[in-house]
Amino acid sequence: MFDFFKRRRNKNREFDWSVLKKRSLPILILDERWHGIFKNIEKTREIIEKEEVLKELLKEEARLAFEKKEILARKKSCLDKIIKLTPEVFDNNNEQSKAEMEKCEKEINQINERVKSIEEEIENMPERIREANLELLKCTINSVYFKMRENQLRVKELEELIEKTRKQLAGYIDEKEGLMEYDNEIYAYFHDLLGGEELQKLDNQYFNKT
């Protein structure tokens, strides 16, 4: 991986952030892989703040959609009521029914104005969410790549330590094998010279074997 970064640097090109706007990106806070980035590193305060902005926008989008659905249901209820009141108002000239109809008409006008406002807000939400998502991604990239750069420096240190340890280990193995080979030769010599029974006595004396 270290060579990978080296190759990238050799191209001597700056990253073009505008490229991100051309890509279809997932909503980061809904992406498990994005959350996985922070298993071993802490989120910076800036990332947390950008994450909260995005969360609030998603909540607002859902709230607007719910409000629109709710007030349209109220509008339908008002329209149904007007239909029911129509005979009393126009056939019987019922003043109370007229007042109720006017009240319904007023509420419908208010609902229409609010629906128009909500639809304008909803229309702008995807772009606002997209921009907030991009800001969060930029912060994530900056934070994570700094961490990756630190990691690569540590990887290089570890590679050097591993190589040093490998050489030390090879030396220890050679030393161990040399000692064992020497002991085996000596043991074989005295076995032939003294015999197994006497050699056993020496083992018992010098190695505390019973």
Image (cartoon, rainbow, N blue to C red):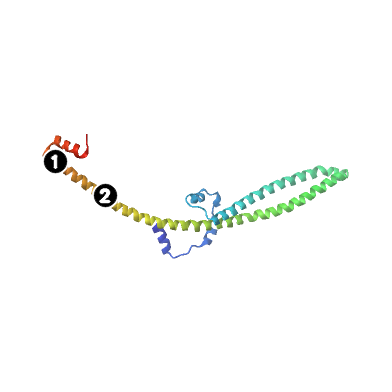
Place of residue 32 in the rendered image (x, y in percent of width and height, measured from the top left): 52, 48
User: How many C-alpha atoms fall within 10 Å of the one at disc 2: few (<14), some, or many (≥20)?
Assistant: few
Measuring from the top left, give residue 89's x and y in whole percent.
Answer: 85, 45
In the depicted view, which residue is nearer to us: 173 or 116? 173
Depth check, mark 2 against mark 1: the one in front is 1
**Relative to 16, 105 lies left or right:** right
Callout 1: SS? helix
| Residue at which label 2 appears | 172
Q: Is residue 170 left or right of residue 74?
A: left
How many residues crowd around disc 1 within 10 Å: few (fewer than 14), some, or many (20 or more)?
Answer: some
* Front-lying residue, 81 or 140: 140
Please name the residue shown 62% across and 52% down the image.
56
C-alpha distance separating marks 2 and 1: 27 Å
Vertical relation: 99 (above or below) 152: above
- Closer to the camera in the image, 123 or 45: 45
Q: What residue type is disc 2 on?
A: Tyr
- Picture layout, residue 32 above or below residue 141: above
Q: The residue under label 1 is which amino acid type?
A: Phe
Query: Which residue appears at 46% of the width and 56% of the height?
Result: 147
Residue furthest bottom in the image? 12
Q: Position of residue 127 (x, y in %)?
A: 61, 56
- Mark number, residue 182: none
Quadrant where the N terminus is found in the figure: bottom left
Q: Nearer the viewer, residue 145 or 105?
A: 145
The C terminus appears in which quarter of the rendering? top left
Position of residue 194 measured from the top left corner of the image (x, y, whole percent)? 12, 38
Which labelled disc corresponds to residue 190? Answer: 1
Helix or strand or loop: what does disc 2 sit on? helix
Q: Which residue is rendered at x = 19% and y = 44% of the image?
A: 183
The image quarter containing residue 159 is: bottom left
